[in-house]
Image: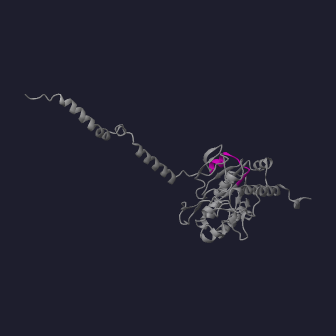
Amino acid sequence: MKKNNSRRFPALMVISLLILSPVFLLKTNPAQASGSMPDWQEGQQSESTEYKEQKDPEKEGSPSKESGKTDENKKPQDTLHANDAAQDTSPAEETTQPAEADPVTPSGPEETSFAGNSQEQTLNGFFSQTLFIGDSRSVGLMEYAGLETPDFFASSGMSLFKMWDKEIEVPGMGKMTLQELLEQKTYDRIFLMTGINELGYAHSAILKKYEEAAESIQNLQPQAKLYLCANLHVTASRSDRDDTYNNANIDWLNGEIAGIADRRKAGFLDVNPLFDDAQGALCSDFSGDETHPYGKYYQRWGEWLYETCRNAEALESSPDESNTG
């Protein structure tokens, strides 16, 4: 008589399931089954993202006039164009990054002759109906000179060849072209500080554009006193190695601007003696990028503009003693 083996089957099935269950569990990880990422993969992704962020950090912009946050040893970024005299399009740009290091204490422009709120109010009162048009140097005055009341139509790389097409955000007025600004607001005085970015063009083309710009500004604002400003020198080191942006070319341009000012009965302002060394170049102690003064010297520049213009305008308004009886 054969033994009944049917009772053995349930026991064997239980034993088999106990043996196979670890293998089954290994092959069906709950994290993978749900679509989530295992811990070791999540760790790899986080590390990869952090590495990317370190390799490609968000660049810091220049402090804005509204923010009130400034670094006195920073300068606005310079944009100078390479030589392209044959075309009327903007030449290729060369960008010089300003250095952040503090210079050795130089003997140069006095650090602030206008200290205190009353003097600042005098300075800002004088420039309350003033417009500055220009490139990165004008941006420097906007950011660091403590001038809160003037309007600025300025940007790094500003060029006479693009000046009338460019739109710039003017605080309190919105984004507009230079012509729109000159048509909508009346100024007592206007400063034009541009020309160095144009040195890559043919000299005749530069002078034609500059003369046209001065004429257009005077036609749109006939009541305003127009000041044409000399371009700031670069350091001797940069001048010696640069075929375009050197002090010989800058001096040529400044001389021509003085001639335009004379023909148009405008003022001519040359701040270079305030910043030059004994060789007639931008003093290297005053600049970290060989092109712009450190931020703390723009305040002295603003004060120099106030003093110079105030004295010149006082002379113009005084009666001619030779005609008095």
Q: Quadrant of the N terminus?
A: top left
Read off the magenta span. 178-190
The residue sitting at the left extreme is 1
* Residue 184 forms part of the magenta stretch: yes
Q: Quadrant of the C terminus?
A: bottom right
**Residue depicted at 31% across the width and 38% down the height:** 25
**Residue depicted at 77% across the width and 59% down the height:** 110
Task: Examine the rendered structure and indicate whether residue 75 appears above or below residue 180.
Answer: below
- x, y (%) of residue 268? 73, 61
Which of 222/68 is in front?
68
In the figure, residue 281 lies in which quadrant? bottom right
In the figure, residue 104 lies in which quadrant? bottom right
- x, y (%) of residue 37? 39, 42
Q: How many numbered discs sit on the rendered protein?
A: 0
Visible in this render: residue 135? no
The residue sitting at the right extreme is 325
Chosen colour scheme: one colour
* Residue 39 forms part of the magenta stretch: no
Visible in this render: residue 54? yes
- x, y (%) of residue 4? 13, 28
Image side of residue 188 versus residue 24, left or right: right
Image side of residue 10 versus residue 291, left or right: left
Which of 319/291 is in front?
291
- x, y (%) of residue 322? 88, 62
Which of 99/212 is in front?
99
The residue sitting at the front extreme is 1
